[in-house]
Amino acid sequence: MRRVSIFGATGSIGQNTIDLIGRDPDAYDVVALTGGQNITQLAEDARRLRADVAVTADEARLDELRAALAGTDVEAAAGAEAIAEAAARPADWVMSAIVGAAGLRPGLVALEQGATLALANKESLVTAGALIMDTAATSDGQILPVDSEHSAVFQGLVGEDMSAVERIIITASGGAFRDWALEDMAKATPEQASSHPNWNMGQRITIDSASMFNKALEVIETKEFFKCSHEMIEVLVHPESLVHALVGFNDGALMAHVGPPDMRHAIGYALHYPERRKLPVARLDLAKIGALHFRDPDLHRYPALRLAHEVLAMGGHAGAVFNAAKEVALDGFIDHRIGFLQMAEVVEEVLERLSGSQCLKNAEMTLDTVTETDHLARKTALEVIKEQNR
Ligand code: NAD
Ligand code: MG
């Protein structure tokens, strides 16, 4: 039996992972499941999958989790320390699907104990790309991408030599506001930004899709994971969300990955890798679909994409600043403290203010240097929001 753990089990990716594992329960020995506020879901899944331990990120809700698990053998635990401890429990395959920078530490711990890390938490690579890739290289662990675009590129590279790759193209749906005028985007509400035309995802990534901060994170993720130059990475708006990515080779060939917008494909590929196994995803009828559309993104509407390339040019800890400032700006938008377009302004201002800071110049990258940078960027972002709103 394969020992598996799922971090962020109650979220969108976590639940899709549980759906796949739950279809073949005898094949898996579930070690740890973690969640946040959804104690009922966490306890229900932990009971059904007979997990060794269930952890909620919220320490205040430990008693509630204990009560929900009463009469079972499932251990209950709470807090960030307990999540890191759960990641240290030996497992063969670990899903990293916590949202935000909080996913970094459990991912590192899981790699250190030699697990295969199925990485949905793109923030890990954006915040600490060199650290997480080095940890994978020096431990017995390995990373497999779960973000649909990166899974698509990874699949396009099987049997290929990276030196023959000229470009990597990741697609973007354009999100909720792809056909909106800029002045309407300025007035957009969190509710409007929280519905995606093609994908069903957690609220934060859905809003990040509307602003293309998600695609900006993915550009950085591409650079860190595939170790290519950032000039090779292109973003293409593709409203149908069926072509997830394309790899361009030096003979002019473009290898495209086409599939339905269902995260169980990328999760299942990482779960069964290097094999391909039957997955419960829709089969596309291309004749019925008829046409696929592509266009260049308008950087004026999506400044996050420009910022991503600036971050990559800065290098080092700039990714940690970018991600942390983005998380704070997103909180501000969700809480109605700042407008939709103001998110990019806040992030740009934080990058500018911290561009000369010692944090960014730090040559060495450790969990401590990343955490320090993350905290400084969050503090600076809160100051910027306060000043901009004065
Ligand atoms: P979600 O909001 O649906 O779920 C997030 C999970 O993380 C939940 O289990 C929540 O309880 C937990 N969590 C939140 N804050 C936490 C904290 N501080 N500490 C510990 N746990 C915490 O998010 P999602 O859409 O499933 O996305 C998860 C990750 O996968 C993100 O990094 C996202 O960018 C990435 N991703 C998601 C999709 C998708 O289709 N949803 C696609 C590609 C990549
Ligand atoms: Mg993606």
Image (cartoon, rainbow, N blue to C red):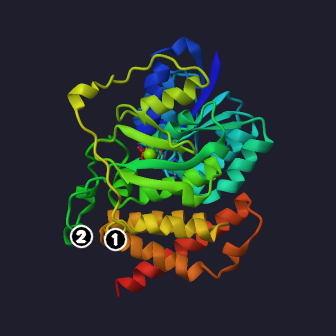
Res. 302 visible in picture:
yes
Ligand 2 contact, mark 1 (Cβ < 8 Å): no
- Counting residues from the start of the chain, the first of labels 1 and 2 encountered is 2
The N terminus - image quarter = top right
Q: Residue at x 52, y 55 (%)?
A: 233
Is 101 or 300 nearer to us in this picture? 300
- Name which residue type carries label 1: His
- Rendered location of residue 166, percent (x, y): 57, 49
Is 155 or 214 nearer to us in this picture? 155
Q: Secondary structure at mark 1?
A: loop
The C terminus - image quarter = bottom left
Q: Residues within 10 Å of mark 1 (few under 14, many from 20)?
A: few
Q: Residue at x 49, y 57 (%)?
A: 217
Which residue is tagged 1?
300
- Rendered location of residue 18, percent (x, y): 47, 27
- Rendered location of residue 2, percent (x, y): 64, 20
Q: Is 71 left, or right, of 183 in this rendering?
A: right
- Circle 1 or circle 2, nearest the eye: 1
- Rendered location of residue 99, percent (x, y): 49, 49
Which residue is tagged 2?
182
Q: Residues within 10 Å of mark 2 (few under 14, many from 20)?
A: some
Query: What's the CA distance linking mark 1 and mark 2?
Result: 9 Å
Q: Which mark is residue 116?
A: none
Which quadrant of the structure image shows residue 176? bottom left
Q: Residue at x 38, y 39 (%)?
A: 243
Q: Residue furthest front?
A: 251
Q: Are marks 1 and 2 in contact (CB under 8 Å)?
A: yes
191 lies above or below 113:
below
Is 25 or 177 nearer to us in this picture? 177
